[in-house]
Image (cartoon, rainbow, N blue to C red):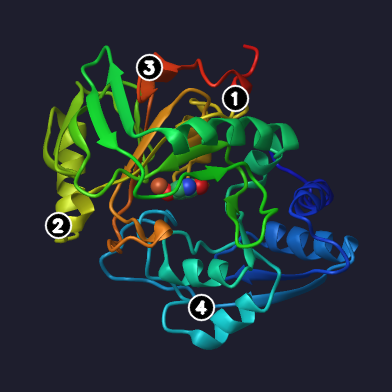
Amino acid sequence: MPVSQSELTQHFEHVLKLSRVDETQSVAVLKSHYSNPFIVTAAMEASYRLGAKAYAVELPAFNHRTAMGNDLTAYVGHTALTGHPAAQQALMAADLVVDTMMLLHSPEQEAILKSGTRILLAVEPPEMLARMLPSLEDKRRVEAARQPFEAAETFRVTSAAGTDFRARLGQYPVVTEYGFADEPGRWDHWPSGFLFSWPNEGSAEGKLVLDVGDILLPFKTYVRDKPVTLEIEEGFIRRIHGGFDAEYLRDYMAHFKDPDVYAISHIGWGLQPRAQWTALGLHDKNDAIGMDARAFYGNFLFSTGPNTEVGGPRNTPCHMDIPMRHCSVYLDDMAVVEEGDVVAPEASRIET
Ligand SMILES: O=c1ccc(O)c[nH]1
Ligand SMILES: [Fe+2]
């Protein structure tokens, strides 16, 4: 459904207030020609309504000839900000950056955050921003799941379809996403509502079996053919086999001619009840990057490629996000998700 400019601006006022924007703050709206003008206008207007000093930083779109499609998460790491210290300074000068062009998984984003500047990514269509308007309750539930995740040494996933995956934890931090950037140096994404970490280098192993209904981002396809099996050893996908979906995934990843694309990247689970598994099927591919799929309550989300977000050495541009249903996720011996339903910690659950 269409969302009016005034409704979207009100939502931005709500989210920027949660992001601690007030008359003491400056807000830089990072945009490019493909930014949603309703979002840019709403971010500027809402900032001024909150008494903040807002300004826009406009960069020309960056295209790499290896990149295919328009999804902003398909080709990551190298952006219009790469090698542009003046623009980076202009963003680091702000207390909060509203990113409407996608810096995620880029070293430049990490440098901006390290300066204490907060970043809020907002690139989804206004219908999704409105439907998954963040709340302090979202933050409470997602942050409740952080504690056992940070304490755990092993991460294990199983499913009736045959998934049997494990990884050691501890080398990298836990990252939470609850939809607003309220702490110095925090990055967040509106809409969201999930958390993840990265396997210790070389520790991910076993089998991930994508069953019918699991989702392949940025393809924005639901697996419909027989299962896709990924065999993982020492942190990397060694074999991908199954039907058409497997062949398509193999061909797409091979296109990048970069061994790092087969690395397992962030692993975690979804805690957003207002995110819907079915939403992706209602949008054209260029409408959205598919945050419903990444955040739906009880999913297991894994990904491939870069670990730049946590200062890792892999800055490979090919990034797959693959949310799966009906999985069981264990932190050490504690199940946090059982066959697609969140079971622990109790404080992270919702009454279904
Ligand atoms: O919110 C996001 C979006 C994409 C991604 O790879 C991680 N988190
Ligand atoms: Fe991802």
Q: Which residue is mark 2?
A: 259
Image position of 156 (left or right of 235): right
First in sequence: mark 1 or mark 2?
2
Secondary structure under tag 4 reads loop
Disc 2 and disc 3 in contact, CB within 8 angstroms: no
Q: Which residue is nearer to you in this view: 64 or 238?
A: 238
How many badges with numbers are in the image?
A: 4
First in sequence: mark 4 or mark 1?
4
Q: Is residue 33 visible?
A: no
* Residues at marks 3 and 1, CA–CA distance in whole angstroms: 18 Å
First in sequence: mark 4 or mark 2?
4
Picture layout, residue 123 above or below residue 298: below
Disc 4 and disc 1 in contact, CB within 8 angstroms: no
Residue 348's disc is 1
Write down the quadrant of residue 91 in the picture: bottom right
Q: Which residue is mark 3?
A: 326
Q: Nearer the viewer, mark 1 or mark 2?
A: 1
Residue 123 image position (x, y, % from top left): 58, 54
Q: Nearer the viewer, mark 4 or mark 1?
A: 1
* Residues at marks 2 and 3, CA–CA distance in whole angstroms: 30 Å
Q: Which residue is nearer to you in this view: 207 or 156?
A: 156
Residue 329's disc is none
First in sequence: mark 4 or mark 3?
4
Q: Tag 1: residue type?
A: Ser
Q: Which residue is mark 4?
A: 60
